[in-house]
Amino acid sequence: MTASPRTVAVGGELPYQIHIGPGLLAEADLLTRAIRGRHVLLASDDTVAPLYLARVQEALQAARPELKIGQYIIPAGEASKTLDNFGGAINALAALGATRDACVLALGGGVVGDLAGFAAACWMRGVDCVQLPTTLLAMVDSSVGGKTAVDIAQGKNLVGAFHPPRAVIADTSALRTLPVRELRAGLAEVIKYGAIRDPLFFQWLQAERAALLAGDDVALAQAIARSCEHKAEIVERDPLEKGERALLNLGHTFGHAIETAQGYGAPGNDNLNHGEAVAVGMVLAARLSAALGMAPAADTETLRDLLLAYGLPVAIPAGLAPEALLAHMRLDKKNIAGRLRLVLWRGIGKAEVVPDVDEAAVLDV
Ligand code: NAD
Ligand code: ZN
């Protein structure tokens, strides 16, 4: 059975739709609907481009021969989410002669989405961006909600902008070429939605593990749609992360610290990728919550068991000193006035921002 396409609406000041289904990257109608002007920059990475870029470009060009389409391809991996490559994307827009009605198409995972989205946010103070996510993580998280950014030496995502996409088109067929390690990383973010606000979804994820890990189309489409509904609901109410949206960061302060301390994951190294670091981070946040008496210890074990069953790491990688991680956590954007502000939880289905967490308790876990 193949999944039929579905749509999730994201409301708010700049509403848009998330289309989810098989084969959507070749659907010219859907692709061109979001393009207003003549200039299109197709941004991608050197793993995804050989797989999917031609089909997108051909669909666009066949439907709209007048389009002027440029390409900007970065090396795959987090190490490419830099100010240099941001400049490269801007130069590509300039070389294309892009005007204010230009459209940037971000074809790839969260790295391409964040970088290309940021370039779209800045070119002529903001042009359209359509997200074409090709990793599970990008489909359920990074392509939705309008956060765009690049990394600098001091930390991840420290330079960026809020710039909602004009549309998100998630072609679930693209997941067939995704390495299973990347699929698992995306599933970590899917599990996060269950952990912070949906106990029934959490149970469904316990039951559907085999299907999801096997790449079952129908199960994956269901997981993506449910995750996008959650993200849409949250970003609609809190687009600029003044409150509730912060809950989406469960496990992320710990996770970002691991990513920064270790150096980022990339094809060819063993460093944790984003989803894996978040899996470890969620376990640490849950343990800390239990230690502070906020959550039942049994729930912490249930979450850990589920992540483990999905083949995700649940402990800090060997060789990383807790003190070094804490030092990175102190630099987190969410902190206010030098106090450690963390997303903790109350057990499966409920998370909460705690503004002033005791550093000694953090070191303990
Ligand atoms: P990624 O973009 O590096 O993709 C992971 C790997 O998979 C890359 O090597 C890529 O080339 C490859 N790949 C992508 N699609 C493929 C496909 N269909 N087939 C085969 N290979 C494929 O990483 P990611 O996990 O997608 O995203 C992580 C990034 O997203 C991080 O930079 C993180 O900060 C960011 N992020 C942003 C937000 C947000 O709200 N903006 C949310 C979560 C994460
Ligand atoms: Zn994340």
Image (cartoon, rainbow, N blue to C red):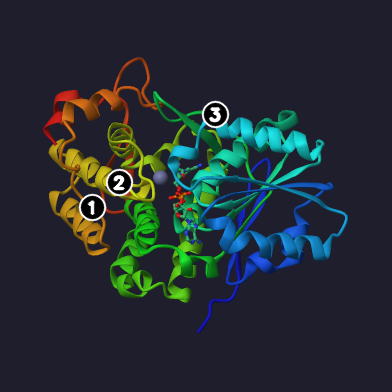
For marks 1 and 3, give the one nearer the viewer. Answer: 3
Q: In this view, does 176 lie to the left or right of 324?
A: right
User: Is residue 150 at least partly visible in the picture?
Assistant: yes
Q: Mark 1 points at which residue?
A: 313
**219 lies above or below 353:** below
User: Which dot marks residue 272?
Assistant: 2
Q: In the image, what residue type sits under mark 1?
A: Pro
Q: In the image, what residue type sits under mark 3?
A: Leu
Residue 136 image position (x, y, % from top left)? 46, 59
User: Is residue 160 at least partly visible in the picture?
Assistant: no
Q: Mark 3 points at which residue?
A: 83
Q: What is the distance, in whole Å, between disc 1 and disc 3 at their CAs?
A: 30 Å
Circles 3, 2 touching at the beta carbon (< 8 Å): no
Tell me the quarter of the picture where residue 325 sits. Answer: top left
Q: Earlier in the sequence, mark 1 or mark 3?
A: 3
Residue 51 image position (x, y, % from top left)? 57, 63
